[in-house]
Image (cartoon, coloured by chain):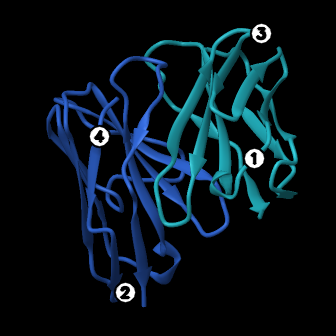
Chain colours: A cyan, B blue
Amino acid sequence: EDQVTQSPEALRLQEGESSSLNCSYTVSGLRGLFWYRQDPGKGPEFLFTLYSAGEEKEKERLKATLTKKESFLHITAPKPEDSATYLCAVQPPNFGNEKLTFGTGTRLTIIP
Amino acid sequence: SAVISQKPSRDICQRGTSLTIQCQVDSQVTMMFWYRQQPGQSLTLIATANQGSEATYESGFVIDKFPISRPNLTFSTLTVSNMSPEDSSIYLCSAGINRGYGYTFGSGTRLTVV
C-alpha cells in the first residue's frame, strides 16, 4: 500500500528564513507527486506536479524537487502569507486509478 | 484549471439525519472525487464518481452510508446518511481536467453532527 510521510509536522520560521519541507514516499510505482497548500477552512490549492526524479518546479518563493524516494518543498525568504499547511500526495502508476494518497501535511507558520 | 463550487460550506445536523453536499464544476470532467478530512488529519478518499456508472468506494466506505450521484460531467452530490457524531468532518470534492495535471478541490463542507 502506498505511504506518504511528511516532516516536520509543524515548522515555525522567521520572515525571510529559508527552509525545506520533506515528503518521503513508498509506492509500487509513481505517476506523479503533487504538492498542495491548504489554508484554514479552505480546500487544498494545487501547487506542483512532479513526474520523474531530478525534476524541479518553481513558483514564486517555492521550489519543489523530486528524487526516487522523496520530494522537498524549498521555501526561500518566506513571508507571513506563506503560512499554511503544505500537503503532498502520490498517484499510482496505472492509468484508470486516479486515487491520490496524501501525507498528513506540514503546518508552516511564518513569524513577521 | 477547473473551478469547483461546493455547498453548503458548513452545517450542524442532528444525529440520525442525512445531509447532501453538492459540487458544481465550471467545465466537463471525467472523474470527480470525494474526500474526508478529519480534524488535524490528512485527506482520505471516500469514492471516485464517474459519470454514467456507479461510484467506486474505498475500503471502509459503503454506498449505503455515502451514496453518490453523478448525473452529468459537471455535477456530483455526496450524501452522508444516518449521521452520527463520528461523521463530523470536512468533506471535500475534487476533479481533474487532465490526468496527472493537478486536481482542483472545492472549498469543503464542514459538518458537525450533534
Q: Are marks 2 and 3 in contact (CB under 8 Å)?
A: no
The quadrant of the picture occupied by the C terminus of chain A is bottom right
**Mark 3 surroundings: few (<14), some (14-19) or many (≥20) residues within 10 A:** few
Q: Are marks 2 and 1 in contact (CB under 8 Å)?
A: no
* Residue A23 appears in the picture as rendered: yes
* B58 is higher (above) or lower (below) than A57: below
Is there one chain holding both mark 1 and mark 3? yes
Mark 4 vs mark 2, CA separation in Å: 32 Å
Are discs 3 and 4 both within one chain? no
Q: As drawn, is B21 to the left or to the right of B71?
A: right
What residue is shown with label 4?
Answer: B3
For label 2, the residue is B15
Measure the alpha-carbon separation of dots 2 and 3.
48 Å
B48 or B112, which lies in front?
A: B112
Q: Which residue does the image show at 61% across and 70% down from the upper left?
A: B39
> Is A102 left or right of A4, judged from the image as shown?
left
Residue A78, which numbered label?
1
Q: Which mark is in front, 1 or 3?
A: 1
